Image: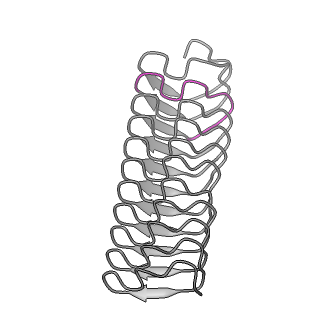
């Protein structure tokens, strides 16, 4: 915290933790190499892990726990990210709950999403979507308001919207179809674009 200006109640432990910019934000915690390094006026952020929350500048109320977790967030707030590389590319994305290695890992702007499981919703910029299970909605790009529960559920979905898939591989080949409901293992697994 060599650049502390007027911020209060901040805790920094680790090489370059909260040290990259003039810090005026309050109530931040950064533990780890380069954790919260670029914080400026952001507040109430918790960054624990190597480069966790490294690029946060003015964002508020983020929790980043794990190596490179939320390390590209700049202004996105109210994210809870746990797991190596979870939410690693988020910049302005907000109000996301992410648990699992690389979950929401390359997404940049999504909001209101819940991704639980390794690589769940890995590339998504969609919103109000729930993915629970390893690789659930893994390829989702702009699809929104989808629910996928089960490993590989809706894993090929890119732009499909308002789909519900419950069960391993349910709607597994779906790419852009919308308004489908599949409940059961591999249910509607061959559906690609049908509504």
Q: Quadrant of residue 44?
A: top right
- From the viewer's perspective, is 175 left or right of 154? right
**Where is residue 140 drawn, in percent x and y?**
54, 62
Which residue lies most toward the top here? Answer: 2
User: Residue 76 appears at what percent x and percent y?
Assistant: 64, 46
Looking at the picture, how far across and down is residue 103, in whole percent?
Answer: 43, 53
Q: Name the residue: 45% across, 72% down.
A: 154
Q: What span is in magenta?
A: 32-44
Q: Would residue 26 be found to the left or right of residue 66 on screen?
A: right
Magenta stretch contains residue 43: yes
Q: Residue at x 55, y 24 (%)?
A: 37
Is residue 111 positioned above or below 33 on the image? below
Q: Is 13 on the left or on the right of 143, as rendered?
A: left
Picture quadrant where residue 31 is located: top left
Residue 19's place in the image compared with 74, above or below, is above
Q: Residue at x 35, y 54 (%)?
A: 118
| Quarter-of-image position of residue 132 | bottom left
- Residue at the (52%, 68%) spot, across then down: 157
Residue 78 screen position, x and y as percent: 58, 52
Task: Relative to 30, say whether 193 is above or below.
Answer: below
Which quadrant holds the N terminus?
A: top right
Of residues 160 and 66, the one drawn nearer to the viewer in this rendering = 160
Which quadrant would the C terminus be assigned to in this image? bottom right
The residue nearer to you, when weighing 2 against 178, is 178
In the displayed structure image, the side of residue 190 where residue 177 appears, left or right: right
Q: Residue 107 colored magenta?
A: no
For the stretch drawn in magenta, the main secondary structure is loop
Count of marks, rendered view: 0
């Amino acid at each position: 915290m060599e650049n502390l200006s007027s911020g209060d109640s901040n805790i920094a432990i680790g090489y370059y933790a909260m040290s990259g910019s003039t810090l005026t934000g309050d109530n931040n915690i950064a533990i780890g190499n380069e954790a919260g390094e670029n914080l400026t006026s952001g507040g109430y952020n918790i960054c624990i892990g190597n480069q966790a929350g490294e690029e946060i500048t003015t964002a508020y109320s983020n929790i980043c726990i794990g190596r490179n977790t939320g390390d590209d967030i700049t202004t996105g707030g109210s994210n809870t990210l746990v797991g190596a590389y979870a939410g690693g590319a988020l910049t302005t994305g907000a109000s996301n709950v992410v648990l699992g290695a690389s979950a929401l890992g390359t997404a940049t702007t999504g909001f209101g999403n819940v991704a639980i499981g390794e690589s769940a919703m890995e590339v998504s910029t969609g919103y109000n979507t729930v993915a629970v299970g390893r690789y659930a909605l893994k390829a989702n790009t702009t699809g929104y308001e989808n629910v996928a529960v089960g490993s590989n559920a809706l894993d090929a979905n890119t732009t499909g919207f308002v789909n519900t898939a419950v069960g391993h591989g349910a709607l597994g080949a779906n790419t852009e179809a919308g308004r489908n409901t599949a409940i059961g293992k591999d249910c509607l697994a061959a559906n690609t674009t049908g509504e």
